[in-house]
Amino acid sequence: MTEDDDNTLPGIAAILAGMVAMSVNDMLVKFLGGGFPLHQIIFIRASIAIVFTLAIIRAEGGFKNLRTRNGKVHVMRGTLVVGANMSFFLGLFVLPLAEATALYFVAPLIMSLLAVPLLGERLNATRLVAILGGLVGVAIMVRPGGDLFRLAALLPLASAFLYSLLQILTRRIGIAEKASTMSFYTQAAFILFSAAFGLGFGDGHLKFEAGTSLDFLFRAWTWPDIDNGLLLLALGAVSAAVGYFLSQAYRLAHVSVIAPFEYAAMPLAVLWGWLVWGDWPDTLSTAGIALIVGAGLFMVMRENNQRRRRFAARSRTPLP
């Protein structure tokens, strides 16, 4: 048995743990959104998560790992990740958890499109079929011409677009930087942005209709009671766990093995939505979710098979 074989099961376990943590993170943000503004939730979450991240950095070799030659790239990554998270959570506040998560999972399809002009990759037939299938799923869920409520579906799509740019940018520095280092600068970006936003709008002087995304963004800061304080503490710990487990998964096992397991977040989102809010996707939403997830899985698994064939051809060894 090879070392890669030994690491495969721990890698799968890590990605599944990361997906559980991510689904809990999204559920807690949506739940806490009933009483706190988004920028306050993000500030507290990142402030707690950065403490855990610093502990990981110290364990991985010390704070010297915070030194970087990619300062400008980290600033760009920080801007993109803040935009992606804010867009997703603003949509999540209005949309059912399962629908928002499904729309966000269009990100792999967007990445395939962006990789053509930005990374010089080719748009082959497999990608084109998957992208078209995913776009049909998006159209079903957004339901153009429907009520104004469906406009909120554009927010997770905007998040997926920004996340795709983030991941493409990450490829440029991922070899030179540790995952914990990138995570530190990401959490720092969250803290700086949310603190600045809170100083400018945290008094709640801008008023919007209750229950809307703008109300969630601009409402006044609120001092949490003990119960909510514990939930916010848990949110910060879960956020740190997401970053750690995802980094650990991709460090231990091959991307081709790990990537399909990210879609475990989809049934978890449906489960949390049903348990906490009693939401269950209707027939059209279920069809849209199936198309988006199916298209993403089809593309990931098909292209992983093609990579294996190319590798086998180069090494002149038969496929298992």
Image (cartoon, rainbow, N blue to C red):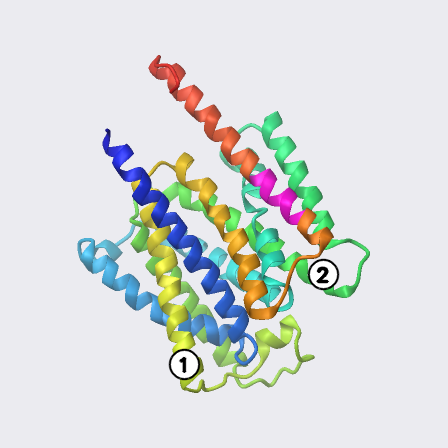
Q: Residue at x 47, y 57 (%)?
A: 81
Q: Position of residue 56 (x, y in %)?
A: 25, 59
Dominant secondary structure of the residues highlighted in magenta in the image: helix
**Mark drawn on residue 229:** 1
Q: Is residue 318 left or right of residue 202?
A: left
Asked whether the viewer can see residue 120, the reply is no
Q: Residues within 10 Å of mark 2 (few under 14, many from 20)?
A: some
**Which quadrant: the C terminus?**
top left
Is residue 293 covered in magenta? yes
Q: Position of residue 166 (x, y in %)?
A: 47, 49
Q: Residues within 10 Å of mark 1 (few under 14, many from 20)?
A: few
Stretch of the chain drawn in magenta = 288-296
Is residue 201 covered in magenta? no
Q: Which tag, 1 or 2, sits closer to the chain's start?
A: 2
**In the image, what residue type sits under mark 2?**
Leu
Q: Position of residue 302 (x, y in %)?
A: 52, 29
Q: Is residue 214 left or right of residue 143?
A: left
**In the image, what residue type sits under mark 1?**
Gly
Residue at numbered disc 2: 151
